[in-house]
Amino acid sequence: MHESCAVTGIFAPGEDVARLTFFSLFSLQHRGQESAGIAASDGQTIRFHGDMGLVSQVFDENSLSQLCGHIAIGHTRYSTTGSSKVFNCQPIIVGEGKNTIAVAHNGNVINAENLKQSLLESGYQFRTTTDTEVIACLILSSAGATWEEKIRAAMHRLQGAYSLTILTSDTLYGVRDPLGVRPLCLGRLNGDGFVIASETCALDHIGAEFIKEIEPGEIVAIDSNGIRELPEKSGKSALCVFEFIYFARLDSSIYGRLLYRARQRMGAAMAIEHPVEADLVVGVPDSALAAATGFAYKSGIPLAEGLVKNRYVGRTFIQPDQRIRDLGVQLKFNPLREILEGKRIVLVDDSIVRGTTTPKVIKLLRNAGVKEIHMRVSAPPIKYPCFFGVD
């Protein structure tokens, strides 16, 4: 299954923020593998580098050295809106001079086309096909004497899911939609620096200390005067359940819950609700291994590593079209015949969304001589579509 990107932002005078942003994006690579980009500001000029590919492929010493400044935002992309093309790389930069902003976006704005049409009629021109550029131009065109006022005015017109990092020449902003569909957290770096990121694992990797989850509807502004937290009372909260099931990394925490523990408990609950007689518990690597551990512990059935994963094949849910996904599944797993042959196994997976992976994995296991396969899925059935950034 797949989700629309990772965002990060760093304000840290005296630090090599472009390099720190690179490392934070590296830890968020699992959220998007199509493209990566960083925009940085020295207080006067915003500079950008981005391209198609993984974070490690897009950036090198030369490109990072060009991104000078004490503020930066970064992005890794999986396209839910707009094609998988280089011109859609984020962060998106719009405006001129002091009226320039860069925006990185995780989510999906469901009224983007209507907003875009209104902006086109007002004279705005678009160079990408992303809803992120719509957000950026909407902020630019919104009423307000300050960027905070403009951002808030834009939020009142946006419908859907968005966690944003926004860069002006001298300020870093973190913004979360009123439903809080996508996660966004705040951390402190080396005393007077701050980090905003999609997941807490990005804070850990650069030595930042977790402060808080940015609340639904909240704007956080960080500049040379410090940090301003600008909450707006939000009603219903609707964090995407797939953050706990699949998207977020095992070593991240959301609202104080470590993802590894959450997924482990899902597996344990399955063992109680749907017990079975079997010889081995096998998790589909990597996203279902924690649930498999929980199932094995609660059921008393031994846990086995029955599938070996090729870690150089991307996440099959996070690929841009079905043909590539199908090929990816075939290359991704290899069963351990010596462990599995003649065995009754419980095959644990985290979710079934498209059903791309499951039939092929079962066929691989049958060909390896597995006697019985009992499927257990830690996510509830997916009955209805979601338009808030899940494809």
Image (spheres, helix red, strand yellow):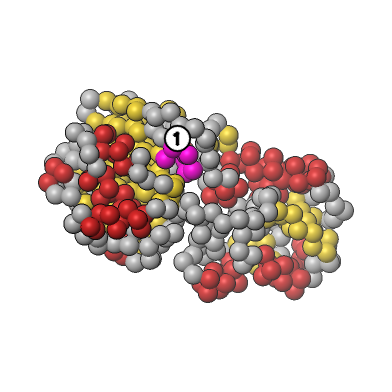
Asked if one can make out residue 156 in the rendered structure from this viewpoint, the answer is yes
Q: Give above or below for 168 relative to 391.
A: above
Q: Is residue 3 above or below residue 162?
A: below
Q: Is residue 259 left or right of residue 152?
A: right
For the N terminus, the quadrant is bottom right
Residue tagged by mark 1? 216
**Which of the two residues, 133 or 50, is positioned nearer the viewer here?**
133
Tell me where residue 135 appears, x and y as whole percent. Answer: 31, 49
In which quadrant of the rendered view does residue 191 lie? top left
Q: Main secondary structure of the magenta part?
A: loop
Task: Work out which residue is located at the far right of the displayed protein and give it.
Answer: 277
Quadrant position of residue 143: top left
Residue at 49%, 43% in the rendered image:
181
Residue beneath the point at 18% across and 40% down: 169
Report if residue 265 lies within the magenta region. Answer: no
Write down the region rendered in magenta: 177-187
Q: Residue 325's spot in the image, x, y percent?
A: 54, 69
